[in-house]
Amino acid sequence: MEPGHTSWHSTARFALACTHAATLCDVQVVRPSQWVSEPGGVAEELALGSRGDEGLARRLKALARTAPLHDLDARKSQLQWADASVYQMAEIGFQAIDQVTIAMDFDHGASHDQIMARLLPLIEAHAPGRGRAEYERVARWVLDGLINVGTVDRGFRAVYGMFGDVGYQRRTFDFKLLVELVSPDGEIYLRASDEAINVLVGALDTDVESSQIAAEVKLENLIRRGRLSDAQVAAEQARYRTVQYAEILRRKLDATRRDVRTVDWLNEVPDLISEALAHIAARYRAENAILANITEVRDDAVEPDRKRRAAQLVDIIQDCIRRHTQLQARLQDAGSTFRAEQDRQQFAGAPQRAAIDLFGQLLMPVLQQPVADAVKATDVFFQGVVGPDVRSAPRLTSLVDLLLSPPREREPLGKPLPEPELAPLPDPDAFGPEVWERADALLTAVDATRRLSGLLEEARVADPDLPHLVALRVVYAVSPPVGVALRQGDESLLVAVDDGEPLADIEFGGSDLMLGLARVKAAERAFAADVAVADGV
Amino acid sequence: MADGLRASDAEDAARLIALGLRPRQLPSRDVVYADLVRRHEQDPAFTDLVDAVAAGLGLAVLAVTRQSGAVLAAMTDSVFEMKIDDYAKRTALRDRQIEKVLHGVIHLAVAALSFPRPADLADDTYVGRVSVEQVDQAVREACRVLDERTAAADLNADPLQDSPGLEQVWRVYARRPSASATSAGRVTSDSTRGMTQKALRFLADQGFLHQVNDEGGGTFRTTPRYQVQVRELAAERAFDELIAMGVIHAGNPNGSIRASRPEPEGLPDV
């Protein structure tokens, strides 16, 4: 844990975290408690007026939810390992929540590492040239701050005051921004909580269905008017709503899988499924129409920035469509899940005798009790259920035997495995040996100076692959390795010269090289070999 | 029977109890054990003797059957008593009550999911299956339902700042993360999944569960011994405690408590 990274549990801290919030809290929360003491005064009236004022509590809670982000910026100056003042921590925090939300789909969220990787380039932009290790540390620090690592509950707690029946009372309020969950394969991944999505997109605590329709209409208008940057914001909002919608449905279906009896399969769920399917169908049509529209904009756009933005929009819309398709598949599974679960639960034998209903009569009531009371019931249940605790008594003779017995010889592990030496496979030949032979024949047959075009035509008659190889070898001959030819004791060497004549060929372009065979004087051992070029090339 | 009582009978009775204290030992795998169980079944004098010896040791004999062997329970203040403080001792001193209640709720949920219906608990041949994921998700779902119910009732149930003991258990559970990653990427032991895993492994060590596979964080099946333990002792005691607190009213005068399972959303039973 970093120094100064304290859990987030007091009003004092809350006030520190953002001065702006502190003034608001002072006005709304602390003062009324002082006023209460004056009987019959203005305070009394105010207190009565605000009694049960849900709006006040809601506003205080909404304010508290942004505090962890302010807190990141407030704490950054205390970091010992880097000069973190240049990093806009709240911004990075928003981006982290953003990335987690985008990565959320039906079953999964994003792993810590994925989010880190996505954050690094964004963090680098804040302070270029600081080194990857520091960016990773900043990313980890922000992520930990949003999860609130270091507290047992890994969440945040804020205190707010309310007027209740017995006067002014301070209450605590818990919330989370990023939640850690386990996927079916045992990996830990992150999901953004509803609070986080609300903080991120703002005032999303409304009817998902209607706000989605509003966003779609807005999106279409914007695209028609050609305002792409606004359209992108609207499209992103539409995607967040899509994610939120999927999340609601996922919870319903999860509940169905766990316990058939907790879900109304007569009316509620079938209605929900048909509503969701209708919703998907409508969205699918709308989004496809939008997609066609934007694709057109993208293809017609001349300005590169506009083209890029249209392309981004296309991606977002495609992602929305993908999510809808995913959701639809789940909805179709739901019916068969229900039937299977019902079969499993219904065809058990009839009850033979009365017994306690553990879930309904013990677990649910215990969950509703205050901690101080419930602990009595859970303690006796625990003591009853775990069975006797048989402690092992140490016996001296056993201990002596254990200490005196010679160490057991371990079986030799067998011969060490030879470390196989693995050589990479050679690349497969582009041309078969036959083609090589023909090319050799063709090129060694160059007795007089010839043009490349002539050779190519000749080669094309023999084999369709041959011209390619011939062309490559001729290009190679523009600067032939004389030294190698000398060492190998070759008699002659193919030499190509460019005289500026363009090549007229159906497959290849470039210069129509002139070719000739050069004789190598083996007697000369000097590095610059004296090459006598035949036929005056 | 006093005149017929011999020292060897006392030895046999004590041996039956000793075998019962080894949860992995079963009559079907041990001829001597099987003989003793049969004798306990057929000889009332021997049955009394076993009960008396057990009582002297601070144990209660819950059942002696061929499937489960002798199922024993520690009485209060017996040397064999397992304290929840020892079980949860690795947790920090602060919030000890909260840790205790969470461990207790998880054990309750393990039993509730092993025997989802009252009939399952009553049926001696029933074998339950339970996994870490199931337990955690079921409790979370229950918490969600309670949360919705609170929201619907339009009450401000946020706990008071200066009396954390009055906070309802479901809030404590819902607040605790299901899984949180340690720096090594493993699940921490104070997350609810970590605690559930601990409970299931512990019950498996006590011979109450058998691990079947690793699906869902570890899937276990119940043994007859666990069923007896839950039915004859734990559930009764906890239920009595709740009644003493005035939480449950057993509606049926016959003592049949099969009735009114509170449906979380008031929905028809399918």
Image (cartoon, coloured by chain):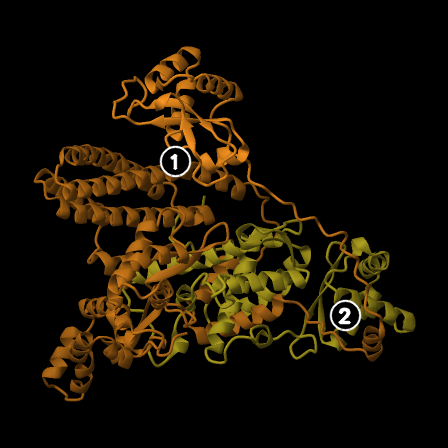
Chain colours: A orange, B yellow
Q: Residue A151 falls in which quadrant of the image? A: bottom left
Q: Is residue A437 above or below residue B217?
A: above
* Residue type, mark 1 in image: Gln
Of helix, strand and loop, which one carries label 2?
Answer: helix
Residue situated furthest left in the rendering: A225
Which residue is at the front of the view, A164 or A76?
A76
Q: Nearer the viewer, residue A328 or B159?
A: A328
Distance of label 1 from label 2 (alpha carbons): 58 Å
Q: Is residue A430 visible?
A: yes
| Location of residue A179 with respect to A78 vertically, above or below | above
- Checking the image for residue B3, the label placed there is none
In which image quadrant can residue A1 be found?
Answer: bottom left
Single out the residue that lies furthest toward the top. A461
Report if the CB atoms under discs 1 and 2 are less than 8 Å apart: no
Q: In this image, B247 relative to B255: left or right?
A: left
Secondary element at image label 1: helix
User: x%, y% of residue B171?
Assistant: 39, 67
Q: Label 1: chain?
A: A
Q: In this view, does A358 lie above or below A250?
A: below
Left or right of B247? Residue B238 is right
Packing grade of label 1 (10 A; few <14, some 14-19, many >=20) is few
The residue that label 1 is drawn on is: A332
Residue B102: % across, % down: 49, 68
Few, some or many residues within 10 Å of mark 2 (<14, 14–19, 20+): some
Residue ID for mark 2: B51
Label 2: chain letter: B
Residue at mark 1 shares a chain with residue at mark 2: no
Could you say which is closer to the camera, residue A224 or residue A342? A224
Give, as a three-letter code, the residue at label 2: Asp
Q: Residue A516: percent from the left, percent from the top?
A: 39, 22
**Nearer to the camera, A524 or A537:** A524
